[in-house]
Image (spheres, helix red, strand yellow):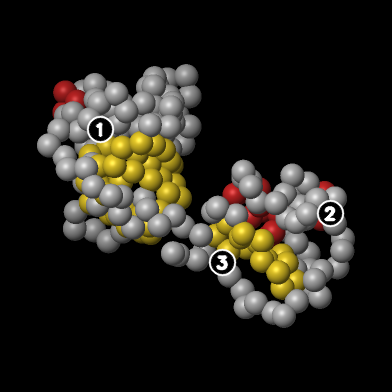
């Protein structure tokens, strides 16, 4: 499990745990200004027990609220999923969670991520990342209507490499659990994810990038 941010625990510190993030609160350091309660009452609410509720919370909102704590009484620990998952967004990107290493090419060093959205429409100006260019321009059900050819289904792995093939797909090295828009799940070893937007076997590559002369730069 990777930890993104964490501080030393004191005797006055209590930790509230959620699925993807935990928040620590140091009562001695708190100035009781109520910034967290005002900014994110769905998570921080003195009328409920526990007063910090991380169920179904938005990670970005929690992190921003914690970072805005003026006294530093609040801190967060962001946990990374133990298996790599790929959530298919209808008419949109693929959202990945887990230990992910993105490589620009086979022989180039990569950069590590634990959450990211990758372009599937082929239109992003910031490939391989999504920049919302798909809106009203890309159509896909986000379902797993197709299966990759000649692939062995195994348990999802703890980490993967994703190699961004020039003018081609996203080649994954490792096991990935795909989660469809309708919540169907499928675990695939070494999948090639279409990023040109033209595959007839989405989310998997079928070579259509060659037919449409897809360019990544």
Image quarter (top left, top right, bottom left or bottom right) of the C terminus: top left
Please give the residue where the numbered disc 3 appears in the rendered image: 5
Residue closest to the far left: 150
**Residue 87, position as x, y percentages in the image:** 41, 38
Could you tell me which secondary element the residue under label 1 belongs to? loop
Please give the residue where the numbered disc 2 appears in the rendered image: 46
Alpha-carbon distance for marks 3 and 2? 25 Å
Pointer 3 and pointer 2: residues touching (CB < 8 Å)?
A: no
Alpha-carbon distance for marks 1 and 3? 34 Å
Q: Quadrant of residue 171?
A: top left
Q: Quadrant of residue 11?
A: bottom right
The disc, 1 or 2, on the residue closer to the chain's N-terminal end is 2
Number of other residues with Cα within 10 Å of mark 2, as a class: few under 14, some 14 to 19, many 20 or more: few
Q: From what the image shows, is residue 145 above or below residue 177?
A: above
**Residue 78, position as x, y percentages in the image:** 55, 60
Please give the residue where the numbered disc 1 appears in the rendered image: 204
Task: Identify the residue at image location x=44%, y=64%.
Answer: 1
Number of other residues with Cα within 10 Å of mark 3, as a class: few under 14, some 14 to 19, many 20 or more: few
The disc, 1 or 3, on the residue closer to the chain's N-terminal end is 3
**Residue 163, position as x, y percentages in the image:** 25, 49
């Amino acid at each position: 499990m990777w930890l993104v941010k964490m501080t030393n625990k004191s005797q006055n510190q209590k930790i509230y745990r959620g699925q993807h993030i935990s928040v620590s609160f140091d009562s001695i350091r708190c100035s009781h200004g109520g910034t967290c309660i005002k900014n994110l009452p769905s998570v921080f609410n003195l009328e409920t027990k526990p007063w910090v509720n991380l169920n179904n919370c938005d990670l970005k909102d929690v992190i921003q609220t914690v970072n805005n704590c003026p006294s530093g009484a609040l801190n967060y620990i962001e946990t990374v999923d133990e298996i790599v998952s790929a959530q298919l967004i209808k008419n949109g990107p693929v959202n990945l969670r887990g230990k992910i290493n993105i490589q620009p090419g086979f022989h180039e060093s990569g950069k590590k991520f634990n959450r990211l959205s990758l372009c599937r429409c082929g239109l992003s100006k910031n490939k391989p990342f999504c920049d919302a260019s798909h809106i009203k321009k890309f159509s896909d059900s986000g379902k797993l209507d197709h299966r990759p050819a000649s692939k062995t289904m195994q348990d999802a792995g703890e980490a993967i490499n994703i190699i961004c093939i020039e003018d081609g797909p996203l080649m994954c090295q490792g096991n990935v659990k795909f989660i469809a828009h309708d919540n169907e799940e499928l675990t695939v070893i070494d999948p090639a994810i279409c990023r040109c937007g033209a595959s007839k076997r989405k989310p998997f590559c079928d070579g259509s990038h060659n037919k449409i002369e897809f360019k990544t730069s």
